[in-house]
Image (spheres, helix red, strand yellow):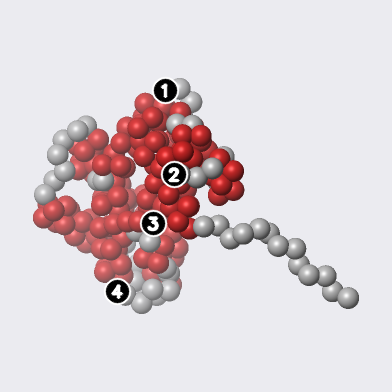
Amino acid sequence: MSKTPARRGRPKDPDKRDAILAAATALFLEQGYGASMERIAALAGVSKLTLYSHYRHKDDLFQQCVAAKCQEHTPDAVYDPAGSAPLKQRLQAIATGFIELVMSEEAIRFYRMMCAEARQTGKLGRLFHDAGPEHTLQQFEQLLAAAERQGELRVRNRRLAANHFFSMLQGEHFMRAIMGEPRPAPRILRAHITDVVETFLRAYAP
């Protein structure tokens, strides 16, 4: 006689998850990492029990906020190694999403907050890197590996190439934004993206 599998509880409510992420992002930006889980739950309109059923601890919640913001601008599908779009078009899409992300007001405030916290422990920067930049670099490396197999690129060090791509994209514009200067006009950013993509393709041409 077979046993009925035990239930793992109710499925997580996506609306509550989104409300928690929105509340956490707002409070992290306002109060830094010192924002309490109690305040986050209250702002999201959920109980602490519900909050902890979605996110085990504040580190996890912070990283999910970062990951959600990355997904918003550049979904995982854009990096899919099996994608059928031309490589240049895919790089343009990745670059456009990345620029929109790093030049957003939320991202700039996150960077400033991490710089301030770094003088104490540096923990916030490590959490951010693992959830955002590291994940992005790994996805891009997989895309480069697929492009190599198809003879579109010749890359000896994929991690280095990925760093080159995203570092070129940030460039002067991101540095100026961090310092409080106005965001460049859309045409300037579009020209910058096109130049970076074309430079990258020339550098790693087979």
Alpha-carbon span between mark 3 and mark 2? 21 Å
Residue 195 in sight here: no
- Specify which label sits upstream in the sequence, 3 or 4: 3
Labelled pair 1, 4 in contact (Cβ < 8 Å): no
Tag 4: amino acid: Pro
What's the residue at 54%, 42% (across, down)? 47
Alpha-carbon span between mark 3 and mark 4? 22 Å
Mark 3 or 2: in front is 2
Residue 77 image-quadrant placement: bottom left
Residue 193 in sight here: yes
- Find residue 94 and report its horizontal and vertical position in percent: 31, 60
Q: Which residue is mark 4?
A: 86
- Find numbered disc 2 in the image and state the secondary structure of the residue it sits on: helix
- Specify which label sits upstream in the sequence, 3 or 2: 2
> Does residue 7 appear left or right of residue 99 in this picture?
right
Q: Which residue is mark 3?
A: 71
Circle number at residue 142: none
Labelled pair 2, 1 in contact (Cβ < 8 Å): no
> Does residue 187 appear left or right of residue 4 in this picture?
left
Alpha-carbon span between mark 2 and mark 1? 30 Å
What's the residue at 34%, 71% (across, down)? 152
What's the residue at 47%, 52% (across, down)? 16
